[in-house]
Amino acid sequence: MDAKNMDTKITKKDLNKVVLRGVLLQLSWNFERMQALGYCYTILPILKKIYKNNPEGLKKAVQRNLEFFNTNPFMAAPIMGITLPMEEKLATDKTIDPTSISAIKIAMMGPLAGIGDSLFWFTILPICAGIGVSLSKGGNILGPIAFLILWNIPNLAVRYFGVTKGYELGTNLIGEITGGSVMQRITNATTIVGLMVLGVMTATMVNVPLNLTIGKGSQAMTLQAIFDGIMPNLIPLGITYLVYRLIKKGKSVTKILFGIIIVAILGAVIGIF
Amino acid sequence: MLLKAILITIVAWLLSLEYMNGHFGFSRPLVAATIIGALLGDIKTGIIVGSSLQLIFMGISGVGAAVPPDAIIGTVIATAFSILAHQNVEVSLSLAVPVAVASQALDIFARTATTGLMHMADKAAEEERYNKLELAHYLGGLVIFARVAIIVFPAIYFGVGAVENLISFIPASVLKGLEVAGGMLPAVGFGMLLTMLDVKKLKPFYFIGFAFATFGNFSLIGVTVVSCCVALLFDYFSKDQKTPDNVKKSSDDNLDELMNN
């Protein structure tokens, strides 16, 4: 390894730069190529370094990394980590076909978006937020603080280790994850945890207080008591399931939000609530 | 009020940047409302409004290409109204929803406008001017400032008084209705999450979680512990029965959906 090669070798410091710049991944998110510019921006210092003596190669690499890219923002880290050794190899000995780097980016961004979304947005975030909310009863500052700490452990871990460990594993991990059923198993497991937590939140966090009384005198029975007699939390479950069906049928969330507000107001005017 | 409006506009901008970049959690309603509360001198109200809004916006995250109703702007406005106009939390919550939707419409416009920066970057790469490419990326932050300032500044500067007057005209039953809506709206977030976790075969686990909480009075953390064990057992047994092909088929649909969103 002579001095010239050392000059263009990716170091730990360079990878840390990628971790830091990755924070700004979606600053220029747009409908045309989504995270493309952010991706290129994030790995630009590394491209500049490995193509130090080859401006034409650098130009090609930058243009290639301005192609469409979009994934779960946390999962961009491992994709960068895994493809950077390939970029390095391409720059040093050209034994890699540049189109294969693009192919791997595309192959990984879709499935990892699915895993990242179900893991971060639909499992970890609801759990952390649920804990934060339950601790902040009565305006307790502990709630927001607990949420920030719990949430940032996995956030920072994936951002940092995604790039550094991803770089270490390089191309090996790609075969391991996309080849076998490992990814499918991870998706199933996180979906189970997500669904069960969602069931709890439906039962405990949706509130529909019915105020209507049926009958008179000692025969009087509140509507709430009747529904509770069938099953407690029946109405929260029903509303949540109805919303789910409506969204699945393609109704817009905005319309559903306004629909619920209108129903609630009408109900209050009539005196159901 | 001018200073407060400027201050809140800037904070709303920073939170909006953080919502898309970094995801450290500051822009989640629980924390964002706490920050706005602290700035306006009523941190306790901030936390209370924040924890209610957190539930409503729970299922609303940027997934794929979908642009969600703007939880941050909704949170900022609701918290500011709660504190500045001494409004009760539920009414502020309902005010937040239309603002979040208006902000969403503007966001779609802004994300389309940002396409121009993409072309600026293409040109910079062609000219091998990489500082200009980085500048194009940073300018995205300015586009976000523009779309945040258009909504937040007037809402705070002119809005609180106007909203106060408006509320005095609203009949009590409508206010009660808005309060009820505040309790029902978390169902929207949960309904959205359900469509994201839409694996037919795994659907019973949702009802298992529901039953644990309804009949067993399990806490969220309790069910999380149980669900992790269940997930591990499920993984173990489905591997044992050699059915990964079936599993793959049913939930590939789900993944495809997520990817196409």
Image (cartoon, coloured by chain):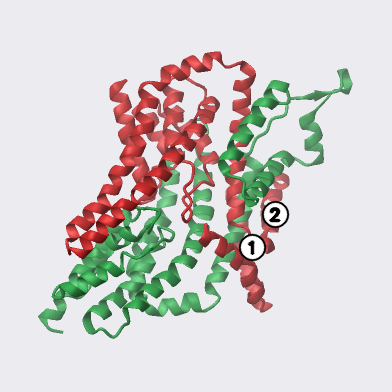
Chain colours: A green, B red
Q: Chain of mark 1?
A: B
> What's the residue type where badge 1 is placed?
Val
Q: Chain of mark 2?
A: B
Of labels 2 and 1, earlier in sequence is 2
The one nearer the camera, B169 or B44, is B169
Q: Quadrant of the N terminus of chain B?
A: top left
Q: In what element is the residue under mark 2?
A: helix
Q: Nearer the viewer, mark 2 or mark 1?
A: 2
Left or right side of B206 for A63: left
> Where in the figure is residue A63, as x and y percent of width and height?
27, 67
Question: Circle 2 is placed at which residue position?
Answer: B208
- Give me the disc on residue A46: none
The one nearer the camera, A70 or B8, is A70
Can residue B24 be seen by looking at this rendering? no
Q: Residue at x 17, y 64 (%)?
A: B128
> What's the residue type where badge 2 is placed?
Ile
Q: In what element is the residue under mark 1?
A: helix
> Where in the figure is residue A13, as x and y percent of width and height?
22, 66
Residue B122: quadrant of the picture: bottom left
Q: Residue furthest left?
A: A3
Question: Circle 1 is placed at which residue position?
Answer: B230
Q: Residue at x 40, y 59 (%)?
A: A74
Q: Is residue B105 above or below residue B181?
A: below
Contact, CB < 8 Å: mark 2 with mark 1? yes
Left or right side of A217 for A113: left
Q: Is residue B55 above or below residue A261?
A: below
